[in-house]
Amino acid sequence: MIPDVNAHIHTPYSFSAFGSISEALDGAAAEGVKVVGINDFYSTEGFLEWRDGCAERALYPLYGIEFIALDTKLQASGLRVNDPGNAGRIYLSGKGLACPPTLSGEPAAELSRVRSEANAHSARMCEKLNAYLDSEGCAVQLDFEQIKSSLTCGLVRERHLAKALRLALYPDADDPAALENELRSRLLKAGGPAFVPEDPAAFLPVQSVKGIIEAAGGMATYPFLGDNAKGGFTDFESDLQKAADQLRSLGICSAEFITTRNSTAVLEQYATYLQDEGFVVSFGSEHNTPAMEPLRLRTRDCGALSEKLRAIAYRGVCAIAAHQAGLRLPREAMIEEGDKMIQSVVSE
């Protein structure tokens, strides 16, 4: 029997629907999800807690990280990759990183700089938000350092600012997740009174991000958006064969999907094609919004993955597990070895 898996879960080390790593892992165990991957923005700090928590619950841990890269040529041309609102901006994950983390030297310094710039940007946004609140006669003022210490594990995202404002204004809201999303959309996103454009210098190019991921022992992974609710695709992803060829030219042979974004038909089409083209394909739920959703994977139009998708998902995590263990073999051999490793843990 194929176990349920989820290879992309954010934790409080970036932003998460979960209040702690323990809460996320308790949820996975309760739902019968046996293989779980931590995947925070710009952070490997949760790896050891994730490892130990999985061991306590007989779950198989995967270790990942997420970045936002920038291709200035694509930005200038207006081409959207996997950020539908920002041309040239490219989300990239790393899968199968080493645990304990081994990053050092220049790659570690680059990661530290990106984290520092992300916090500096959030601090500027917090300052602008306070100025707006004051101009509107609102007595609430947010303390950035207090937000950092009380609501985060060191990395402040705009979602933390929205949460802090919601707690200050409406601590007993009936639907806190919806309200935080509304505050973020109206105040902090482009066009909002507290929006602060990000400095292009804060983003690394794709090859630099790939270098950090590989230095940390991982495989660079492209997160496909796939089809949106209206059936549309980004410029980069609309031609799947061309996208696959371009990813291979960058040395990227691993892809992932956040399954609730996609219809079952499109997810099966894209995931099957990429798997047949030799890519490692994995799936996740993300959980990087305030909304608490199931950890057991499902598509946009179905409450569970089809058997075809469950098989692809499991093959993907097996390959990641083998890579994580330091094996560098042909993909099918990696899947076979990873299956042995996973089954030795989850079948206990």
Image (spheres, rainbow, N blue to C red):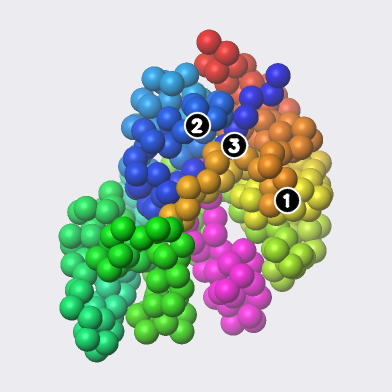
Q: Which residue is mark 1?
A: 301
Marks 2 and 1 in Cβ contact (< 8 Å): no
Q: Callout 2: helix, strand or loop?
A: helix
The percent coordinates of residue 217 (x first, y second) are 48, 38
Mark identifier at residue 231: none
The residue drawn where x is 62% and y is 40% is 297
Q: Extreme top residue here?
A: 348
* Amino acid type, label 1: Asp
Image-based side of 215 in relation to 12, left or right? right
Q: Which residues are magenta?
A: 66-95
Q: Which residue is mark 2?
A: 28
Few, some or many residues within 10 Å of mark 1 (<14, 14–19, 20+): some
Nearer the observer, 102 or 191: 191
The percent coordinates of residue 204 (x first, y second) are 45, 64
Question: Against 260, is 283 above or below?
Answer: above
Disc 2 to disc 1, C-alpha distance: 22 Å
Mark 2 or 3, nearer chain start: 2
Q: Which residue is mark 3?
A: 296
Nearer the observer, 11 or 90: 11
Disc 1 to disc 3, C-alpha distance: 14 Å
Which is in the foreground here, disc 2 or disc 1?
A: 1
Q: Callout 1: helix, strand or loop?
A: loop
Few, some or many residues within 10 Å of mark 2 (<14, 14–19, 20+): many
* Amino acid type, label 3: Arg
- Residue 267 visible in the shown view: no
The residue drawn where x is 27% and y is 73% is 126
